[in-house]
Image (tube, coloured by chain):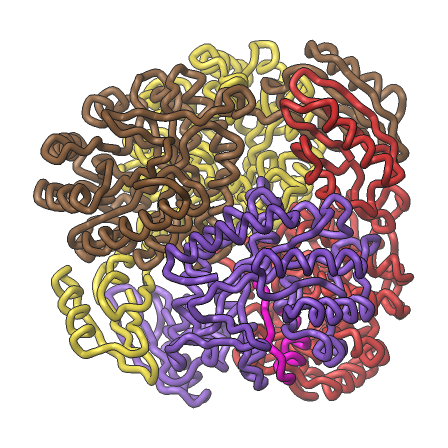
Chain colours: A yellow, B brown, C red, D purple
Amino acid sequence: MIIVMKHHTTTEEIDAVVRHIESLGFKAHLSQGEERTIIGVIGDERPVEPELFELLDGVERVMRILHPFKLASRDFHPDDSVVKINGVSVGTSQVIIMAGPCAVESREQLMETAAAVKQAGGHILRGGAFKPRTSPYAFQGLGLKGLELLREARDAHQLPIITEVMSPHEVTLVAQYADILQIGARNMQNFALLHAVGEIQKPVMLKRGMMSTVEELLMAAEYVLSHGNSRVMLCERGIRTFETATRNTFDINAIPVLKSLTHLPVIADPSHGTGKWELVTPIARAAIAAGADGVIVEVHCDPAHALSDGAQSLKPDKFAVMVTEVRRIAEAMKRTV
Amino acid sequence: MIIVMKHHTTTEEIDAVVRHIESLGFKAHLSQGEERTIIGVIGDERPVEPELFELLDGVERVMRILHPFKLASRDFHPDDSVVKINGVSVGTSQVIIMAGPCAVESREQLMETAAAVKQAGGHILRGGAFKPRTSPYAFQGLGLKGLELLREARDAHQLPIITEVMSPHEVTLVAQYADILQIGARNMQNFALLHAVGEIQKPVMLKRGMMSTVEELLMAAEYVLSHGNSRVMLCERGIRTFETATRNTFDINAIPVLKSLTHLPVIADPSHGTGKWELVTPIARAAIAAGADGVIVEVHCDPAHALSDGAQSLKPDKFAVMVTEVRRIAEAMKRTV
Amino acid sequence: MIIVMKHHTTTEEIDAVVRHIESLGFKAHLSQGEERTIIGVIGDERPVEPELFELLDGVERVMRILHPFKLASRDFHPDDSVVKINGVSVGTSQVIIMAGPCAVESREQLMETAAAVKQAGGHILRGGAFKPRTSPYAFQGLGLKGLELLREARDAHQLPIITEVMSPHEVTLVAQYADILQIGARNMQNFALLHAVGEIQKPVMLKRGMMSTVEELLMAAEYVLSHGNSRVMLCERGIRTFETATRNTFDINAIPVLKSLTHLPVIADPSHGTGKWELVTPIARAAIAAGADGVIVEVHCDPAHALSDGAQSLKPDKFAVMVTEVRRIAEAMKRTV
Amino acid sequence: MIIVMKHHTTTEEIDAVVRHIESLGFKAHLSQGEERTIIGVIGDERPVEPELFELLDGVERVMRILHPFKLASRDFHPDDSVVKINGVSVGTSQVIIMAGPCAVESREQLMETAAAVKQAGGHILRGGAFKPRTSPYAFQGLGLKGLELLREARDAHQLPIITEVMSPHEVTLVAQYADILQIGARNMQNFALLHAVGEIQKPVMLKRGMMSTVEELLMAAEYVLSHGNSRVMLCERGIRTFETATRNTFDINAIPVLKSLTHLPVIADPSHGTGKWELVTPIARAAIAAGADGVIVEVHCDPAHALSDGAQSLKPDKFAVMVTEVRRIAEAMKRTV
């Protein structure tokens, strides 16, 4: 940590900051510039909030030196992590495609979609049983019944399944049915939930909050990792910006940034990242071209009657085109699908 | 809802949209403009996602007409709601001051701060027992022990208490100790939690998410209200923007906007809204001048040793100055403190 | 335009709005919903500010129906525009690569970079003579001398040149030297400048402002087009968001959105869109995979001594790798480089 | 400047960075932490771009220590600057009110509004003669005729006038008529224009760009100050965020932040900061409560027929109420109006 003192600062103020640093078990290191005195804090700064020092008299600003995450960092784990899920490996040269309806609505809807996903070359089936909805008046998901249907589709089509868990006390239940637990964007900083999925042994896909920085996403992963679960995948799904032409702004930069900061696999969600089905395929292609390890997309046999997220769902024929186009890009990147 | 058709659209496409509208139980109303055909959807559009129509061939854009919230709206409840909490009323001409430490750290710390809050004229004591922390390595709160200390401080100083609840299964426990349950900004769209606090009979203060719109805040309130709990207060605590000079950007506009859209009381949190103690008093004054019904601020007897949020905490003497200055502004607004 | 009236509105208020609509030469069209009365404004709404109606008693909200741009829209010009510049065509199946230093610093620097651009397969040479700099203490560009050097490099290497013009009274001068006039992001809404470049007959590349919407970018293009200059290219160069891991957030969604709304060619600037040289190649690949018609990147023979934007400049060898990788992606898109 | 080296870095890389620092005339200062080596750059870093060092092998990140502005900073000018304009002083204990129409439309409109401004207690008359408009199809202002009308209103009502200048070559002309030159938000980084107004001797009011940080606003002021014009006022007018309930988000935090960083007077523009006339008075009160030195608001005798910005204009009677309410807040702040 680096503490920058104000322009006119007294020896007493500097001494007080040094004593405070030492009282926390760190060493202080002074450097006198032309206009500012700078005090370095030597030691592992991670458990300390830099803001604390801003309160001391004479302090202008405090800056972190280290990334606040450790287990998620390439610093201590330079090689790519591979997450294995019942025969599918995420984080290798193969690009993984996860697809399915936003919400499980009925056996017929799910089975038909699962067949289409399998046929087009998808690897993992997605589908929501517990749905976070902005409106209390909207469809909230089939719950347990939805989990059972997912299991049935999984077995019928030999597709591992990913589904969202929304509450700590449902983690055990959902883990009995799902191959991958998804933490939704709105729960990325639901720390009780992160703690709970950190304590079970199921792969977790953590979606970036629409208001969260890359660093905060990595800190959320750190929560899961630090509670003992090492099978974590990250998912870029668009952030909120001033632009209203699309529902979210897909942060394509985050893909190479994450690949450089962390060893965890990075998945792209162009359905939520755009909010419009016409944009899903171009952004899926772009994400793979930027280095993503896979995509997760919404597919629905009758999107106009979907109970949620219809507008961003691909019909099966358009999904098959997407897989073909993504494959061409993957090959240009010397990867497979 | 208004559906705007694309520039060159066919009669078949228009007919299909009309049939779809009617299949959902609405009436359709056509209007032929010079460049676009517009179709109005007549009926209560709230349970329907406008995006659904965007999938139909020939549709360019869909726009809502009604606010998606109903119970929170002034449309059906024109008068201000007053939330009563053990002798304190929020939403009247009296401006309410809630204050206390970010986190309960020890009996001594809490008692000393509570005494200072009471003496300076504060009405409600705040303090966190369960703390949502960005880093898994940071102090996570005293939990149950913290709740017991809050109760002790409450009884010793005759100050109702507000504290955060983070998980649905802790709602009953926290409700046994607290006078007001706080839903934190990161949990504003934790729908399982909103559902849970909607089912008990304790006042709730709902903090706006740092990247949530005013409309989404009102939809979160609608969750609580629609599950039967009518004692809801809203809290503006700053949003995330591109500006890095402050931790958040306090959205002062949101105060008069909320007061015009909803009958629920509106509280301002200038501590989180700025992230810097020097800015807390000016922004507290501004919030009252803009029409807020109260403020919630962090006070700590020794902020430099606070276990969280020290940088935005006022020392007791500065808090007393804040109360005096806020009172002067309240009087200029023909209100009291 | 659609005018939504408030919940409780009187016949007098509705009549007054209708009279106001008619006084402006439009027709009004009433539609009575269950909770709101809606008034359609029939006619070309483009010259009218929707906000005007918000002032009338009883009006809740006003929504546009038409895009405010016309000449830039695909509605009236469905086919792609091709911009021809001395033998290079932008907007065809060939992906165009523009490259060169941020600022022209010296003959040696420019010639060496131009040779590298040509050799690696670049089509157009970029370089700034007039530089917009955030700090008055930073290098402001070589001005006329820079234009002369660009001309020299152009003739030596047979590369058309693009350079920025910052002020209306410099348009004629810059147009004597440049093949393409660039309008920088900070000047995207410098209307005097847009007017000036609209009146000459040189291709213009208009960079999106870092906090401008796609619609505002198209309105800026409309300024140039409406003054008579039809050779306009658009450039996505990253927008400003809350994320600080990169200098800007490259808005990859904007590429397919623009391609669908407008017939004008779309160029991507991954150098400014990321601010870090390591990210330039992945984002260049992504932009082409999303459908961009070309890229513009900063190349410098000695970036660590560059007088501006060194951090986002590629060295010649890395630029050659980028061209190769972009070519592979272009081929996967059935295009050439 | 502080340079943070990557986790695994070699002695050669560190040496190369040190040599680079010394080649630029600075001294280097090494500090070896547990996980990172840090190199301090000693000297006036203002003319150097920190990004330059990010290119060197082994460098992870570079952080500035000094604010990049100097003349605008309180470091070197601790006392408040007072800007004097024909008998009106901005930056004293008197709160200044600037008001008038967005655009000058006709003699009658301007004279009537000016009389209302004067009568209600306004100090300075605003009005646009050259108008920056998002659409080329919208009213662009009366130009010279508008300046003449402003001059006439000024003399008739003894109100100094403020009007916008949009282009460097119009600075001399506008300065002949205006008492204060306004630089609009869209031109805040039009460096040619900043340069031009820096060279004349007229007070300048610089509006913050909707996409600009507080630091960038101060750098724009530094442009004007460094070219010799010391009479600069700053204006907070709202920034662009994800919130769409208001046209802009008025950044109330910026007011105390600016007052602490700079000696220049700070004016608030609640008309543009909200975009809705109902919000103008609450935000004007809030701005004064936060410490602003004045407000600038749009007043129009017939806003529904205004040629621009009608929706955010106050009618004369509502303006008179605003002045009364702002006066009450000013008095609570121990200031006058």
Residue D198 lies in the magenta stretch = yes
Residue D220 placement: quadrant: bottom right
Residue D201 placement: quadrant: bottom right
Taking the image as shown, residue C182 lies to the left or right of residue B168, namely right
Up the image or down, B11 lies above or below A285; here it is: above
Quarter that holds the N terminus of chain A? bottom left
Residue C161: x, y in percent?
79, 74
- Count of numbered marks: 0
Residue D195 seen in this snapshot: yes
Up the image or down, A167 lies above or below D31; here it is: above
Taking the image as shown, residue B257 lies to the left or right of residue C179, namely left
Between D247 and A163, the one nearer to me in the picture: D247
Residue D106: x, y in percent?
81, 59
Q: Residue at x 53, y 17 (%)?
A: A139
Between D263 and A334, the one nearer to me in the picture: D263
Residue A231 seen in this snapshot: no
Residue C180: x, y in percent?
81, 70
Q: Residue at x 53, y 44 (%)?
A: A239
Residue A195: x, y in percent?
29, 34
Taking the image as shown, residue B181 lies to the left or right of residue C222, namely left
Q: Which residues are magenta?
A: D189-208
Quarter that holds the C terminus of chain A? top right
Residue B319 lies in the magenta stretch = no
Up the image or down, B65 lies above or below C130; here it is: above
Taking the image as shown, residue A110 lies to the left or right of residue C199, namely left
Q: Residue at x 23, y 48 (%)?
A: B299
Between B114 and B163, the one nearer to me in the picture: B114
Q: Residue at x 29, y 57 (%)?
A: A51
